[in-house]
Amino acid sequence: MLKIKNLAARIGGNQVLKGIDLEVKPGEIHTIMGPNGSGKSTLGKVLAGHPAYEVTAGEVYFNGKNLLELTADERARAGIFLGFQNPIEVPGVSNSQFLRLAYNKNAEANGQDELDPLEFDDFIQGKLKLVKMDSDFMDRGLNEGFSGGERKRNEILQMSVLEPKLAILDELDSGLDIDALKVLGEAVMALKRPDRALLVITHFPRILETIKPDYIHVLYSGKFVLHGGSELALELEAKGYDWIQAENQSGRR
Amino acid sequence: MTESAKALFPQSAMSIPRPTDWTRHRKLAEEKIHVSPLPTTDQEDWKYLDLSPVYSQAFNQIWSDASLSQAPVEDLAAETAGGRLLFTNGRFDSDLSDISALRGGIYFSQLTETAPHVIKYFGNLATPDSSDLFANINTARFGDGAAIYVSKGQSPEIPLHVVFNSNNIGTDGQSITFPRVLIVLEPDARAHLVEEYCGSGKYLTNSVVEVFLGEGASLRHDRIQRESPAAFHFCTLRANIAKSASYTSTTISLGAAIYRHNPKITFAGEHAELELNGLTLINAEQIADTHSLIDHAVSNCASRQLQKYIIGDSAHGIFNGQVIVRPGAQRTNAGQSSRGLLLTERARIDTKPQLEIYADDVKCGHGATIGQLDADELFYLQSRGLDLNSARNLLLVGFAADVINHLALPCLRHRLLHHVIHKDQSLYPNS
Ligand SMILES: Nc1ncnc2c1ncn2[C@@H]1O[C@H](COP(=O)(O)OP(=O)(O)O)[C@@H](O)[C@H]1O
Ligand SMILES: [Mg+2]
């Protein structure tokens, strides 16, 4: 589904990604872990097509398409979803207005029927339940005045509406209390499908208790330095990232 | 100079059956025109607005039956059916007007046919002595307009809609119209007025609106300016707010090549409230200038002004917001905010807040921001599958929403928002 070869990218004069290789197949859950500043969010944004990030080398293929040739919205309509680490607020644009427009743009691209406001209102109810979000939030501005946790709920709500093929979830756990973390973790698992892959970016291993990964990749200074299965999470939980840092600085660089 | 003001706006060759009640005003105004120079960019108040494209035209006031009811006006609010007066090229158009839904206690009629107790208010705010050239030209030359009078404690159930439609199709030159609105609310009366300008072809609209709010009265006033892209539009608004009255004025301006809006609102009694909102959406080479004045002449009044501009292509927005707090107008609360969104490198805005405060116990503040669409916001929306154009439009809606939401008619709000979201060509009237 997703094939990344030797991907390098920079932002604001910083060479942040320095050669990433990764292959993700349908139905798989991959986790990217790593210390702060290692480039995790950058990888997410580069895959989602943020125009401010410059790809300096490498290739990315998504279901056979050269992803790097597509704009952010084309990637989204092709089935890539990025759940933001820090979703921004867009005052004045109502959540329902935005979500319905997003739904309809994707429906149009995939040859499905668009929904009018009433139909969409029906459609969204079940999704709101999934993330335990009050329907009042639909009438508010997009993330306007939302707490960190409410924004994260809204991200997963968007994911459930857009039904992506590949969901990249960047630090879903940041800003969430334990209960909310469980709700959203379970919501994501409920959205798991054989034809849907997840790329879960996280600094802390806790969320992996609910969203159990098939593979864990450890990013350090723009490169993967360690690959493993879900057992790697326990090791990182116990040891932290310092030893990776130490190992990479001392020897193999 | 004085010769050219006369020459530029000559008396119509046609005989216009003007009412005799305001002969005195007309005569005074005519005299003023003769001695007023045409505004030029040398004058502080006209610094950014070059009127030479107007001055190079010859205008002709059309006043013929033939021009009436030629084409139905599109997109009129359904909510105001039965409460609508429509004027075509300045002239009352009975075929397109309908006030059958109105009950007693409310006068809603042609100015030329209204009652003496309404007429006595005429010209009291836009007096020839205190007004600028354009208001005086209107006073001297107008033929008809709308008069609204709501008796004490009354409140029409439906919004009152006044439409000024200009259609100068088929003639080579520029036509000119002088719309006029007079609205008087007696104490504790309430009303909702929708004032709308539209048209096609080349013409100049020069309107004057006078608003009298009695004690405890409340008026919502929505103004929609969607003139043809080739039009020139000048508007003088004068409002007087008595004790404990409340006035909410929301102006949406989309059309016209050159637009000048000059509202002047005076607090005449304490504990009155004003909300003055404006949204200007322009592109191509449009120029839109709002010169407003809020006069806190007495104490304990509150005014809030929100002025927004969305400017595309090489369009040019101008905002001059004067707020005066007179000596002794204590406990005044005045807030002004202007925000401009420039969509291109060539788009331009000149903003000048002008707070003149002569009392000491007051709360006054203003803020002005000018910016572009935010790249991270655009990316966020695009990452959900919205193409760039839709993402831009949604952000524009977000920017414009707090002004649009002040419009009292749901269908007007929807129409404006709908334009932005669903027509990827966005709001711009001339694209
Ligand atoms: N807009 C930017 N301009 C310059 N440097 C940036 C920008 N965004 C991120 N970076 C840098 O890129 C590096 C990786 O950031 P990020 O991908 O956010 O890391 P992580 O998500 O792993 O914490 C950091 O050193 C950060 O300072
Ligand atoms: Mg990050």
Image (cartoon, coloured by chain):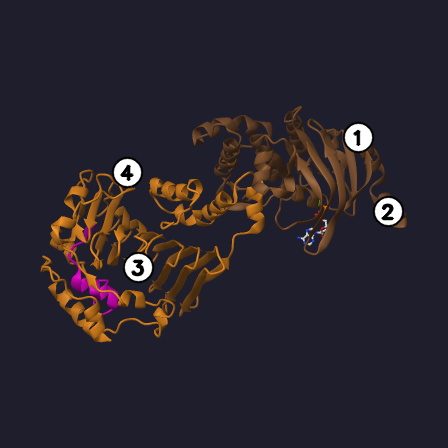
Q: Residue furthest right?
A: A251
What amino acid type should be assigned to the residue bearing mark 2?
Asn
**B417 or B216: nearer the viewer:** B417
What amino acid type should be assigned to the residue bearing mark 4?
Ala
Between circles 1 and 2, the one closer to the viewer is: 2
Specify the label residue B269 is tagged with. Answer: 3
Could you say which chain is coloured orange in the image?
A: B
Q: Is mark 1 on a helix, strand or loop?
A: loop
Q: Which residue lies furthest to the top in this view?
A: A194
Label 1–label 2 contact, CB within 8 A: no
Chain where mark 1 sits = A
- Dot 3 and dot 1 within a common chain: no
- Dot 1 and dot 4 within a common chain: no
Chain where mark 4 sits = B
| B67 relative position to B296: left or right | left
Specify the label residue B152 is tagged with. Answer: none
Q: Residue B11 location, x and y as percent?
A: 15, 65
Q: Is mark 4 on a helix, strand or loop?
A: helix
Between circles 3 and 1, the one closer to the viewer is: 1
What amino acid type should be assigned to the residue bearing mark 1?
Ser
| For residue B42, above or below residue A135 | below
Return the residue at label 1: A230
Could you say which chain is coloured brown in the image?
A: A
Return the residue at label 2: A248
Whether residue A128 is visible here, answered yes or no, is yes
What amino acid type should be assigned to the residue bearing mark 3?
Gly
Residue B130 lies in the magenta-colored region? yes
Q: Distance between the residues labelled 3 and 2?
A: 76 Å
Q: Is mark 3 on a helix, strand or loop?
A: loop
Return the residue at label 4: B78
Q: Distance between the residues labelled 1 and 4?
A: 62 Å
Q: Residue A174 location, x and y as percent?
A: 69, 40
